[in-house]
Image (cartoon, grey):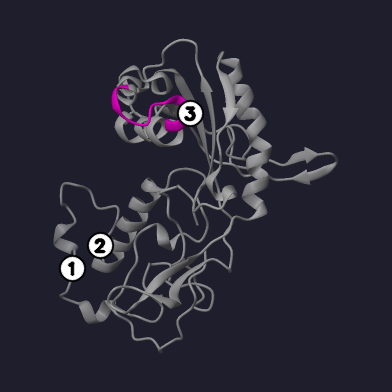
Amino acid sequence: MFHFQTTVAGFMPQKTHGQRGRAGTTAICDFRGVDPGGTAIRVFDDGGTKRVYLGGIVEMGAADPTPITADGNVYAIQLGRLAGTRFGAALKSALRDGPIMRHTVSLLLQSEDAPQTTHRVDLDPRVRDVFGLPVPRVTYKNHSYEQQARLFYIPYMLQLLANTGARAFLAPCGPLLGDPPSSAHLMGTLRMGTDARTSVVDPQGRFWDVDNLYAADGAVFPTASGCNPTLTICAVALRTAHGIAATSPRADSSGAEAAHRTPLGVERDSLSVPRSRLDRVPPVG
């Protein structure tokens, strides 16, 4: 799973000085898809039909403060031939003045991806690498679940930027143009669960068919998050590590429980429960 990202940008008449700070300065959770101030799923009335549109967190900020890589690509490659800024003094002046970077504001919606049984990472049966080994193959396609959420929230994002005085517009969406997702938020494919037939690892992150192998990153997510997954990944990794070491996650930093902890490896056999060999479950998610 990826986050199905939707970007709405706007040009401000005044300078925003996006190069002076982080690309994402703050965020709002209004489009998360839950009741304001609560956790209940928000149900919308769409022409008499009840619908749920689970969007995600909306990152707010100026243009990416990396002018050489971000703006340079726009001026030299995307607009190079039209604006005459492909190389030389014209490109240098465009990078120095930074008309896009200094006047752009943006909203980035991190929509939840729906887990699908057709999504997987396996070995390509035809393509080989330079060593003659099969290369990984990613099978992924956006579902109408997140596409409908995107269409539902776009008007709100456009209106939000228009209210600031910006000239708002919808940025192209790579996955809808046939490109791979640009999100670096990788989730799923080694989903955790209580049933070996429908999951790859157990609730503790241990592979069902490999007793001493654990996964502790975003791959174990059974569903996508509605916001950046970093903190959840850290929590899952800590939980898995405590399970392997047989320590309590509630241990305080003073080391008061150190005497009661079992050093990793001393009772390794007791931490590995023999299991029958199972056929590999295709990664889902």
Magenta: predominant secondary structure element? helix
Give the labeled residue for mark 2.
247
Q: Residue at x 64, y 35 (%)?
A: 153
Q: Is residue 154 left or right of residue 6?
A: right
Q: Residue at x 45, y 32 (%)?
A: 81
Magenta region: 80-89
The label number, if any, that marks residue 25 in the structure image: none
Q: Is residue 95 left or right of residue 35?
A: left
Residue 226 vs 240, above or below: the answer is above
Within 10 Å of disc 2 (Cα), the crowding (few <14, some 14-19, many 20+) is some
User: Per the image, is 83 magenta?
Assistant: yes
Within 10 Å of disc 3 (Cα), the crowding (few <14, some 14-19, many 20+) is few
Q: Residue at x 32, y 57 (%)?
A: 237
Residue 137 is situated, as x and y percent measured from the top left of the image, at: 45, 69
View extreme (top): residue: 14
Kind of residue sitting beneath label 2: Thr
Residue 52 vs 162, above or below: the answer is below
Residue 229 is situated, as x and y percent measured from the top left of the image, at: 42, 48
Q: Quadrant of residue 204?
A: bottom left
Residue 255 vs 39, above or below: the answer is below
Marks 2 and 3 sit apart, C-alpha to C-alpha, by: 62 Å
Q: Are marks 1 and 2 in contact (CB under 8 Å)?
A: yes
The label number, if any, that marks residue 82 in the structure image: 3
Nearer-the-camera pick, 86 or 59: 86
**For the residue labelled by badge 3, is the local secondary structure a helix, a strand or a loop?**
helix
Q: Residue at x 53, y 23 (%)?
A: 10
Kind of residue sitting beneath label 3: Leu
Kind of residue sitting beneath label 1: Thr
